[in-house]
Image (cartoon, grey):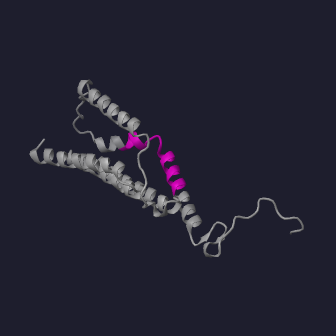
Amino acid sequence: MSALQTFGIVIFGVGAVVSGWLVFRTDSMVRAAYWLMASFVAVGAILVTLDSQFLGLILILMMAGEMTIMAIFMVMFMMNPAGLNPMVMVHQHRTAIAAGVGSFLLLATVALVADFPADPVPLGADPTAELGFELLGRSMLVFESAGVALLAVMIGAVAVAGKWGRFGDADAGSVEPELEPEEGGS
């Protein structure tokens, strides 16, 4: 590993940890979503620095899209206008701290004492193609179905949140219709 790679890993690692910490320090759901995205982008940059460009760029692409969609849904559906008003982002502080420290210690212990396999890639193999077949080979239909379902949900959310909402014009004070029709009506 070159000195430049080591420097990049340290810089992006610190960025990932700091932006991950800021997720819990900010007082806005939307800002928390974007700090979380920044943390994942830094992890993706670490993967790119380690010559895993495919995984790093996929992580960056997916997290950027996911966090942006999450922020849009928060702005549309939260009672807190635009998800930007101050609010407490962490509940049960002592439990959260204990869970975080415990998880870190457990993962650090596994990383230090586990005997990880060191299987080199055979010459002539294409690990990117093999990874693609492993990830999507048997479950491509599931990914495609999930994509179509997410698209339908996004279109429905935009339709419900639009000016002409689910129960009429939003400016005219749209009211949900009665569950039981009135007697004598058509």
Q: Which residues are magenta?
A: 132-150
Main secondary structure of the magenta stretch: helix
Residue 90 painted magenta: no
Task: Tell me if residue 58 can be seen.
Answer: no
Residue drawn at x 15%, y 46% as measured from the top left: 5
Q: Is residue 1 left or right of residue 132?
A: left
| Screen quadrant of the N terminus | top left
| 26 shown above or below 96 | below
User: Residue 149 at x, y = what percent?
Assistant: 54, 53
Q: Give the farthest residue toward the left.
A: 3
Q: Is residue 85 left or right of residue 120?
A: right
Task: Tell me if residue 12 can be seen.
Answer: yes
| Screen quadrant of the C terminus | bottom right
User: Residue 139 at x, y = what percent?
Assistant: 47, 42
Seen from the viewer's position, the closer of residues 97 and 59 is 97
Residue drawn at x 27%, y 30% as measured from the top left: 108
Residue 139 painted magenta: yes
Q: Give the farthest residue toward the right.
A: 184
Residue drawn at x 43%, y 58% as measured from the top left: 71
User: Residue 137 at x, y = what percent?
Assistant: 43, 42
Q: Is residue 159 left or right of residue 130?
A: right
User: Residue 126 at x, y = what percent?
Assistant: 28, 42
